[in-house]
Image: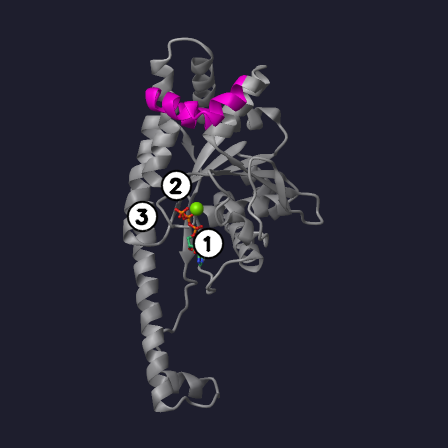
């Protein structure tokens, strides 16, 4: 298989990818990297954010946030594209009612805050409205891939299980149909998969392993390879003596103060590298899923340049995975 085919096969594994993980591990960053990687091989990608666009526009070099309407975020010369939109329960409800000929009622319901009341009375309705909209977008076939930036860890499980709860609660009617269709989406691996993100650190790894089983057992959703974000590139010879190393390389040897600083920095890096290796092993032992490693970006703020590096690393990790599988 050519590298391009591997990436394309990976991106076409399911219509919807839900990116989930503990708060702050890089879900939004991974969502953007996956979307850009898929667009770079020519796919039409839709990124869905919940409630607001968050930090996503900045990664694509946009200063303005986007909302319920679709915005083009990225368009490489090759033909692919990344569009973004935000889905909120209110707007999903209005959309649903409008499509069922109830435009005027819809506007009034939202302006009077009725959804708040309904949502309290019927747990899970918000989630089903939002996922129902995602399902509708998936069925419309206007995107090769939809990437959903999910809420943090535990919330993501609740988010996905809510449709099951609602299906049990509503015996019949449009709500039940909607919940049922969402469950069908979640349980079909060709239509939806969850991509879990972690950092190579103890707590996120523990949490990822735990939520992985909850996603599989409670929701019945398929899991994509896991993403280990912000990995330090592995360097060798970190514990070499800086003066001896400079001599061996025919370079000017550092002064004693500089040599001390170099040694301290190298030790820090070596320790971090060892811890990372331990966590990657623990993750592999606790969860039998392939791992895709994304590199740490040594920048204060991430923008299009770093996103480019991350999406390229994402693609390269997929290539390596398929080469491994072929061997
Ligand atoms: N590979 C990386 N290298 C360096 N910094 C990163 C990397 N990935 C993410 N970050 C930074 O880490 C922070 C958290 O990333 P991000 O917002 O993607 O996480 P999140 O899981 O979406 O967070 P939240 O749970 O708040 O939505 C951001 O400041 C981001 O720029
Ligand atoms: Mg986020």
Question: Which-is-in-front pick, marks 3 and 2?
Answer: 3
Q: In x, y percent, where is residue 168?
A: 34, 15
Element marked by disc 2: loop
**Tag of residue 294:** 1
Q: Quadrant of residue 79?
A: top right
Q: Is residue 132 visible?
A: no
Assess disc 1: are there few (<14), some (14-19) or many (≥20) residues with their C-alpha within 10 Å of its C-alpha: many
Element marked by disc 1: strand
Residue at x 48% of width, y 27% of height: 111
Above or below residue 5? Residue 179 is above
Compare marks 3 and 2 and give the one earlier in the sequence. Answer: 3
Q: In x, y percent, where is residue 82?
A: 61, 43
Q: Is residue 129 magenta?
A: yes
Q: In x, y percent, where is residue 19?
A: 45, 40
Question: Which-is-in-front pick, marks 2 and 1?
Answer: 1
**Tag of residue 205:** 3
Q: Which residue position holds label 2? A: 289
Foreground: 62 or 143? 62
Assess disc 2: are there few (<14), some (14-19) or many (≥20) residues with their C-alpha within 10 Å of its C-alpha: few
Q: CA distance from mark 2 to mark 1?
A: 16 Å
Foreground: 46 or 240? 46
- Magenta stretch in the rendered image: 105-132
Residue at x 38% of width, y 31% of height: 159
């Amino acid at each position: 298989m050519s590298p391009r085919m591997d990436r394309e096969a990976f991106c076409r594994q399911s219509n919807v990818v839900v990116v989930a993980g503990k708060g702050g591990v890089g879900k939004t960053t991974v969502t953007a990297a996956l979307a850009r990687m898929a667009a770079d091989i020519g796919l039409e990608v839709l990124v869905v954010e919940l409630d607001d666009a968050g930090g996503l526009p900045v990664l694509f070099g946009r200063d303005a946030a986007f909302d319920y309407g679709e915005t083009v975020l990225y368009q490489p010369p090759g033909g692919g594209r990344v569009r973004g939109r935000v889905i909120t329960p209110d707007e999903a409800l209005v959309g649903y009612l409008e499509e069922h000929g109830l435009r005027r009622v819809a506007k009034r319901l939202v302006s009077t805050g009725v959804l708040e009341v309904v949502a309290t009375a019927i747990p899970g309705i918000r989630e089903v409205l939002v996922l129902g909209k995602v399902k509708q977008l998936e069925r419309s076939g206007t995107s090769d891939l939809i990437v959903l930036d999910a809420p943090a860890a535990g919330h993501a499980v609740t988010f996905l299980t809510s449709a099951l709860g609602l299906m049990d609660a509503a015996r019949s009617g449009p709500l039940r149909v909607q919940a049922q269709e969402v469950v069908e989406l979640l349980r079909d691996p060709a239509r939806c998969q969850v991509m879990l993100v972690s950092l190579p650190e103890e707590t996120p790894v523990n949490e990822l392993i735990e939520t992985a089983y909850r996603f599989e057992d409670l929701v019945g959703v398929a899991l994509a390879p896991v993403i280990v974000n912000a990995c330090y590139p592995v360097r060798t010879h970190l514990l070499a003596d800086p003066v001896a190393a400079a001599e061996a390389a025919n370079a000017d040897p550092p002064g004693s103060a500089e040599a001390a600083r170099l040694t301290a920095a190298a030790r820090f890096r070596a320790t971090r590298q060892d811890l990372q290796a331990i966590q990657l092993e623990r993750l592999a032992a606790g969860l039998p899923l392939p791992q895709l490693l994304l590199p740490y970006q040594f920048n204060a703020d991430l923008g299009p340049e770093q996103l480019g590096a991350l999406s390229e690393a994402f693609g390269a990790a997929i290539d390596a995975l398929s080469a491994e599988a072929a061997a």
